[in-house]
Image (spheres, grey):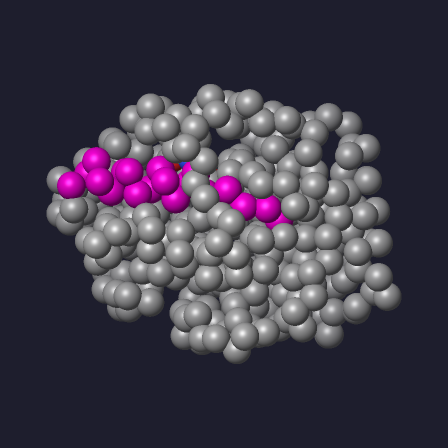
Amino acid sequence: MEGTPKQPSNLSLLLQSLVEQARQLPEQGKVADYIPALAAVAPEQTGIAVATLDGQLHTAGDSSQNFSIQSVSKIFGLVLAMNRLEEEVWQRVHMEPSGQPFNSIVQLEWEHGIPRNPFINAGAIVVADMLVSHYSASKAALLNFIRKLAGTEQIWADSEVYQSEKEHGNRNAALAYLMKSFGNIEAEVPQVLDHYFYQCAVEMSCEQLASSLVFLANRGVQPVTEQLICSRRDAHRVNAILSTSGMYDQSGEFAFTVGLPAKSGVGGGIAAIVPNYGVIAAWSPRLNSFGNSCRAMFMVTRLAEQLGLSVY
Ligand code: DON
């Protein structure tokens, strides 16, 4: 980290200005349309929230509006699985960048059904299998975990997105059956996919997302309640893999320009972890060619620059 991050006298004013700048950018990117329910989202919405370790929440724009967290949910699934299975997780999914699109299938055959990391679809599907195999009600366990982290019961999966994912999930099914053929999926594939699609369909706001992930900026401990959410070693591991693999094929560029562990989702959300400081959650639905939100990238990049938040 480049020294201690500067605390502006009013972080919310800075966030407000970033939202305004993002809204004035020339129109770029397009809303994810490979799942029809995602294509229906109003594309101009733009929000940001920063949760800091002292328990404060700074917000601007559409920060309280719910959106489909999609792949950002892979963080919650992974932490839940790490808490339950410990080292076994890393025998079934690795921790290397994939260098391939998130839903790529070719590498999986060469590498005998072991996904490169838990943030590509194949890796998240193996994690879903771990949850399905170790919890009697894995979807409820995941939702309860997220609710506990966010400090609210008001979080659900969107049924329309969930159904839409199921109806357009052939590539994910192909990944799951291929891994099953290598013996890396224990449960029945339809049950594993059901969990995976449900997890992707969870809806949260920037405010809830930022608050729920602060434990990763604080060595696994929720800073306000002092509750241990995961071990210090596991918080380190999640942040390390987020740094190399959290932003799809743009992870290298994101590390180069921003320098924070982060995860994006095709719903347009980005959660960036700032160790010893807090979490930035930004959202706007239009995506660039890598599948990362154009406006959320802009806001996170500018905020990290202006506050000197890079971990490098
Ligand atoms: O698997 C899918 O098709 C999506 N629901 C994945 C979501 C996403 O954000 C892309 N992820 N790596």
Image quadrant in which you'd find residue 258: bottom right
Which residue shows up at 68% across the image and 58% down it?
50
Percent x, y for residue 64?
Answer: 65, 46
Between 242 and 52, the one lying in front of the other is 52
Percent x, y for residue 271?
Answer: 57, 52
Quarter of the rendering occupied by the C terminus: bottom right
Which residue shows up at 44% across the image and 70% down it?
229
Q: Can residue 37 be spotted in the picture?
A: yes
Against 292, residue 138 (above or below) is below
In this picture, residue 93 sits left or right of residue 4: left
Report if residue 271 lies within the magenta region: no
Percent x, y for residue 187?
Answer: 16, 46
Q: Can residue 92 be spotted in the picture?
A: no
Which residue shows up at 84% across the image and 54% down it?
13
Between 210 and 310, the one lying in front of the other is 210
Report if residue 191 lies within the magenta region: yes
In this picture, residue 83 sits left or right of residue 267: left
Which residue shows up at 28% across the image and 38% down it?
194
In this picture, residue 37 sits left or right of residue 82: right
Bounds of the magenta segment: 188-206
Quarter of the rendered image showing ligand 1: top left
Image quadrant in which you'd find residue 42: top right
Against 31, residue 233 (above or below) is below
